[in-house]
Image (cartoon, rainbow, N blue to C red):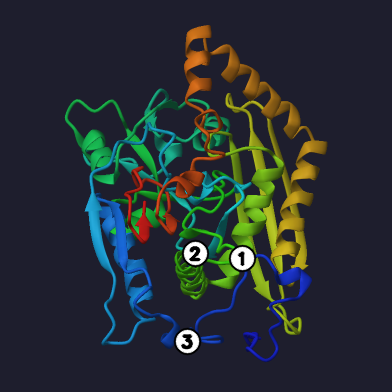
Amino acid sequence: MEMEQPTAETYNPNHQKNRSPSTSLGVNSRPIDILELTLNTPKNIEMNSSQLALIQADLVEREINKRFTTDQKKTEIKSMSTSGDENLLKPLCLLGDVPTALPAGCELASVMLQEDPRDALIIRNSLPFTNLSQLPPGSIIGTSSVRRVAQLRRRFPNLAFQDIRGNLQTRFKKLDATDSPYTGIILAVAGLKRIGLTTRITSYLEPPDLYHAVGQGAIGIEIRTPPVMKLNETLEEKILRERAMTVQKLVKSLEDWRTALTCEAERALLRRLEGGCSIPVGVQSSLVDLPTPCPWAPKARLTLIGVVTSVDGLEEVTKEASLDVCGTKDAIHLGTTLADQLFRDGADKILDQLNSVKKSDLNDEQLKESQLNQPENLGIPSRIANLESTSSNFIIAAPADASRTDIGSNQDYIIC
């Protein structure tokens, strides 16, 4: 039975379990007061110039513009060139790359409706194969994901894996080149759908062969948390605070609560495992509505599967947990509980071994350079906290295969 969304009358924003910014009402149940979207409302969207980024920017822009009246100035997209996907100090374009422990002053305010979170195999045009099982031993699969390599190496030990970088168009060119070393590449289905290239999909990769990344297919929006009103607030401080509050309300209206709860559980799992996109952690989530909602938020049964795999594919730990969730805190509890179960079954040993390998692969000079380039040594507590050093209001962290980009100054909306 389809659950009713809570209304403004039944929803209590001061309820202890509902203070997190990540579980908010949809625009249909608590619409934004258009009168509040004044001339102080941010209007600009800045993003990189890749085709996928443009499509994702347009998707967000259309949703934002629905909140404005016809006589109000709407958003404008401003593209910019990217600096490649090697610079780890830039805002990243994977929701899984957004730090699971955000710095003070930043919050993940909204997670939009999730696209297909699965991965896909794309075989080179000139080859007849239709799935990984058909590939000859030694066939090279292109992917830059440690998670994909670890899981697929365990399922298909006869295959070889090689790094491949760039946006979607660049990766397809590398795959289809006459001298290409790749038999196929692995890409996120969400990016392929948004860019209109699903015809290139040879086969879909899903559990138990491949568990997707945390937050894959979802667009998350991180904002500056509005400052608390000061007793002797200046006019400039008041304008900035009200602007931040308007941005927060606008962003919250874009959220899909089902996707938000799912991503909160997945991110809590990753946070407990103390990992990011560079560790081999895969997930699968499902959420089923329950007939009796809580008085203050939707209620559903959330099931989460977590997988931790050694890089060589020889060891793997898989656990599953379910919980009836009423809000963000319940989803976080589910993810944390599942992570503890994974630890008890040996995931800690796999992750410790991975960390040891990473350290041994760095010589003293590389290690020194790596430490110097860490955000905390630049006075920035996390990569996403670059928001605090610019005048940008929020970042949109999109699905896999978008390129990294700089945050422009004096911009209101940032699409990575």
For the residues labelled 3 and 1, the Cα–Cα distance comes to 25 Å
Residue pushed farthest left? 178
Q: Are marks 3 and 1 in contact (CB under 8 Å)?
A: no
Amino acid type at mark 2 = Glu
Determine the CA span between mark 2 and mark 1: 9 Å
Q: Position of residue 93 (x, y in %)?
A: 41, 48
Residue drawn at point x = 58 percent, y = 31 percent: 154
Badge 2 vs badge 1, beta-carbon distance below 8 Å: yes
Residue annotated with mark 2: 237
Mark 2 Cα-neighbour bin, 10 Å: few <14, some 14–19, many ≥20? some
Q: In what element is the residue under mark 3?
A: loop
Look at mark 3 in the image and give the residue it sits on: 33
Mark positioned earlier in the residue sequence (3 or 1): 3
Dot 3, how many residues are within 10 Å of its Cα: few (below 14), some (14-19), or many (20+)? few
At 72% from the left and 79% from the top, the residue drawn is 290
Q: Residue 157 in the image: x percent, y percent?
A: 53, 27
Residue lying at the far bottom of the rendered structure:
9
Say few, some or many: other residues with alpha carbon within 10 Å of mark 1 (under 14 / 14 to 19 / 20 or more): few
Direction right: furthest residue: 344
The residue where tag 1 is placed is 230
Specify which label sits upstream in the sequence, 2 or 1.
Answer: 1
What secondary structure is marked by label 1?
A: loop
